[in-house]
Image (cartoon, rainbow, N blue to C red):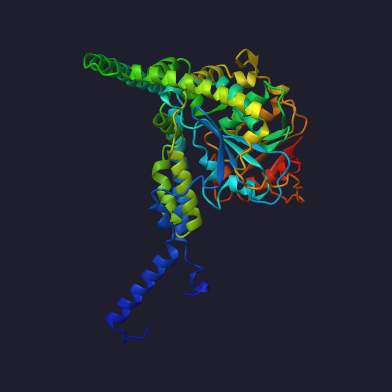
Amino acid sequence: MSAADTAGIPDLSAAWREWATRSERQWNEFFNQIMGTEEFSRGLGRNLDVFLHFQKTMNEAMGSWFMTMNVPTRTDILALGDRLLAIENRLAAVEAQLAGLDGAASASSAGGRPRPRRTKRPEPPPDAGANSHAN
Amino acid sequence: MSAAASTPDIAQQVQTTVEAVLRRGLVGLEYISLDDPQVGATPRDTIHARGPMKLYHYHAQTDEVYRIPLLVITSLVSKPYILDLTPGQSMMEFLVRQGYDVYLIDWGLPREEDRGLRLEDYALSFIPDCVERVLADSGESDLNLLGYCVGGSLTLMYAGTHDSPVRNIACLTTPVDFQQMGLFSQWTDQRYFDVDRIVDTLGNVPGEIMLSAFDMLRPTGRLTSPIQVLDRIRDDRYVKSFMLVDRWAADQIPFAGEAFRQMIKELYWKNALLEGTLELDGRRVDLSAIRVPMIHAMAQHDHIVPHAAARPMLERVGSEEKEEVILRGGHASLVAGGNAMYRLWPKLDQWLSVRSI
């Protein structure tokens, strides 16, 4: 079938695409309107409260159970994590001081690769075709 | 076709046609079935690590580079590979090939013990630390900054509190007016959103909660996205790009608890970054104190950081030389979409190149 033969036939795929895009926009606007209301924010807050209450109750119940079983609780593990973090931070501080003492040589990241010259100059800028507002 | 064509002939023709379509036309199907696509592949070294944070230095791919190094500061709410999506569609790869000496801060995944990280830690400790590392590594005395999304906000917090060696700042879709963040502002309404309880109970805010919030901004997205992909299944470039960006969007990371609490209370409730009342470790973040040349690129269809939230930035900074750019695309496609290489990247290169010597 030549192009001339198809000229009078509507492009169903384009029409469908347009319909799908328009529908998506309309549904999103519809839902966004609902979700933008104060009632929705209040409901979201309540749901979050219920979830957090459940989570807290679970944490406490599991904590007591672990304690009874003589197994470290999440809080115990977190406390250990905090102590490790403190050690990590101190190591980082020592490392920074050592790097400072050692100068740029120790900081170089080239890993044996030759460093390129830092002499590059810009080429004439192409037109990016954007809407720009310069001050 | 002759009227006498036999059934086996017709069957053969149908089979040949179907095979040809599958072979040539549906390349996009390959990308849909990709389980673990290659992301963040531009060669780099980790030159510094502290807690969850890593500082990368990308390998130079040119014989000579611009004198001033470029430090990229990524967002706290998503993984940084959106800026280095895949070979051929990577902003980092583009910048390196254009001759920039590129460094990038990857904030990493906050661990449970990182729940106490605050905005001060990011803006006044990690960033200055990385700035010093970059200067030491490059042997230069100044650098340029490029911040994406909340990474841009952190860039402003750093630059607004320091007499820093920063020569130029480029921000991409960076929020400053948090009361204009659309539904996010609405949902975090002080009367109903108990941020203390969230952080006290959960520690870090899980990635799943962040993902749900982003998904709710476009409620039909999960349904219509696959339809869009099927509609353009023959366009393998589009399908590949779409699948990678979609994967990134679903790959949410936790938000450090204390930083989240601060963000809600100081930025959303008090709008302190815009109002100039944000204090970090006793230092006021003063946007008007930023006087270096700035560019701010925003996306026309950004549903995450609306124009109204991003636009006031250049009005508030003290820079005399500043440029606002609005480009087609959304929040992610601005930096990583199939057309970013024709829109944002050349514009960024045009602006940065003359300021990197």
Q: Give coordinates of residue A14: x percent, y percent.
A: 48, 57
User: Residue at the location (51% across, 41% down)?
Assistant: B81
Observer-nearest of B171 and B184: B171
Above or below, A65 against A15 in this view is above
- Location of residue A77 (image quadrant): top left
The x and y percentages for residue B343 are 63, 48
Does residue A55 sit above or below B225 in this rendering?
A: above
**In the image, is A27 to the left or to the right of A50?**
right
In the current view of this chain or complex, which residue is farthest to the left?
A: A69
Decide if residue B201 is in sight here: yes
The count of marks equals 0
Q: Which residue is drawn at 42% across and 33% down?
A: B211
**Residue A117 position in % (x across, y down):** 73, 46
Query: Residue at image x 50%, y 67%?
Result: A8
The N terminus of chain B sits in image quarter: bottom left
Please say whether residue A21 is visible from this viewpoint: no
- B126 vs A127, left or right, is left
What is the quadrant of residue B58 in the picture? top right
> Toward the viewer: A19 or B137?
B137
User: Where residue A76 sits in the image (x, y, percent)?
Assistant: 34, 17
Q: Nearer the viewer, residue B74 or B274?
A: B74
If the image is split into quadrants, where does the C terminus of chain B sit? top right
Residue occupying the far top of the picture? B282
